[in-house]
Structure formats: C-alpha cells, structure tokens
Image: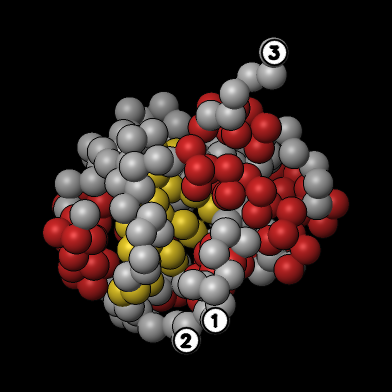
Amino acid sequence: MPEPDSLDRISREIVPCRRCARLVGWREKVALEKRAMFRDQEYWGRPVPGFGDPEAVLWIIGLAPAAHGGNRTGRVFTGDRSGDFLFRCLYETGWARYPSSWGINDGQRLDGAWISAAVRCAPPENRPSPEEFGNCRPFLWREYHQLGHVRAVLVFGKLALGEWFSLMREEAPAVFRKTPSFAHGMKFAYPPPHPLLFVSYHPSQRNTQTGLLTEAMLCDLLESIRSSV
C-alpha cells in the first residue's frame, strides 16, 4: 500500500533530489570549498526542506537557501544574517520560541508558522532559473496541500511572489490570473478556501543593512498577519 503524503514524506523526498544539474554542482562546490570562518564545519550541501509547525496558520515562503546559511546548516533561514533578522522578528511577534537560528540542534521551534523556500537548493548569485523554479514547484504544491490549517501566506521578495502566483494558477487560474506589481506590505484577500497573501521585502543582508527593510517594518507586518488569522 503506498505511503500517504505528509510533510515528513515531502521532506524525505526533497533532501536527495538531484533534478537540477546547475544547482547540484553549485551547492556541492560551496559545501566542499566552504567559507573560511566555517572551514571546520561539515556543510549540509543538499536541498533544504521546510521547517516549522505542521499545524501552521502562517506559511512563509522565501526564495532559496543561502550558500553559507541553509546550504551549510540544513535548515531554511538558519546560520546567516537573514535568518538572524527574520527569527528576531518571529520571536518578537510570538511565532518563534527563540530570537536566533544558528543550527538544526539549536532547539528552535515555530508556533503556528511554517517556512519553505521556493527553490530548495542554493543557487548561484541567488538567482534560480525558470526551469529550476518549475522543478521545485511540485514540492511546494504538495506542502500547500499538507498544510491544511494555513490562513495566510507571507512571501519574501518579487521572485517568491511570482512563484506563489505560478503555483496558485495551477489550482485557480481565473482567480490568480495576473501577478500583481511588487510592493512591501501588500495584502490580498481571495475567495475561500485560498489563504490571505502578504508581501514583504526579502530580509537579505543588503535590504536590511540599507534600511529598505527594518525590524519594525517586518514585525508590524507579522503582527498584522496575526490579527488577520
């Protein structure tokens, strides 16, 4: 009898994936060469599955693991400055147990939230190709159908917004016909059973250091989501 689909099964199938030759080559090259400050650590160097609360009401979707963050630690938004920024905000707004995320054994837990990457492998120059988005989309699609309590989705960045609409057009093409222009703080409501959609700048080091995205901005958005669900 076939095993029923589940978040655990999806994660197990994500980790050994070698579908995208360019991404496989890059993630393994980075894991072998390493950054000097992490030279004594063993890199994960594989696709990074989703992480969080299986009963999540909020689904957060980023672009892809960072080369020396998730590609090193094996957990999305973990082990880099983007993750530090995000988890401080998640902690301040009650979605995370701790204000930092440095490794898979740090005890971090999410309460009511699940985090995924649209593309599961670290891409060169943080830019997945359309084909790579398409190859990962079935994993995102299956997660969507297993996260049965999700009432809001938060996407980080223009590319993740586009991928969300590509995903949803497969289910409801008339509702998600056109991807809207990107702007931080946007909120979209759709007919049930589709979740609310919230949009944020990506918490990349560039965006946070330049002040394009501040902790106050992201915390305000996360609080707004909580009050909406």
Near mark 3 (Cα within 10 A), the count class, few <14, some 14-19 or many ≥20, is: few
Q: Residue at (81%, 46%) from the top-left corner?
A: 19
Residue, disc 3: 1
Distance CA(mark 2)–CA(mark 1): 9 Å
The location of residue 219, given as percent across then percent down, is 21, 63
Marks 2 and 3 in Cβ contact (< 8 Å): no
Compared across the picture, whether 220 is left or right of 193 comes to left
At label 1, the amino acid type is: Lys
Distance CA(mark 2)–CA(mark 3): 46 Å
Q: Residue at (62%, 61%) from the top-left corner?
A: 170
Q: Residue at (66%, 69%) from the top-left corner?
A: 127
Marks 3 and 1 in Cβ contact (< 8 Å): no
Residue 9 visible in the current orientation: yes
Near mark 2 (Cα within 10 A), the count class, few <14, some 14-19 or many ≥20, is: few
Kindly state the secondary structure of the residue where label 1 is placed: loop
Kindly state the secondary structure of the residue where label 2 is placed: loop
Q: Residue at (46%, 57%) from the top-left corner?
A: 61
At label 2, the amino acid type is: Ser
Q: Quadrant of residue 171?
A: bottom right
Distance CA(mark 3)–CA(mark 1): 40 Å
Q: Is residue 106 above or below residue 28?
A: above
Residue, disc 2: 181
The location of residue 128, given as percent across then percent down, is 69, 65
State which tag comes first along the sequence, 3 or 1: 3
Residue, disc 1: 178
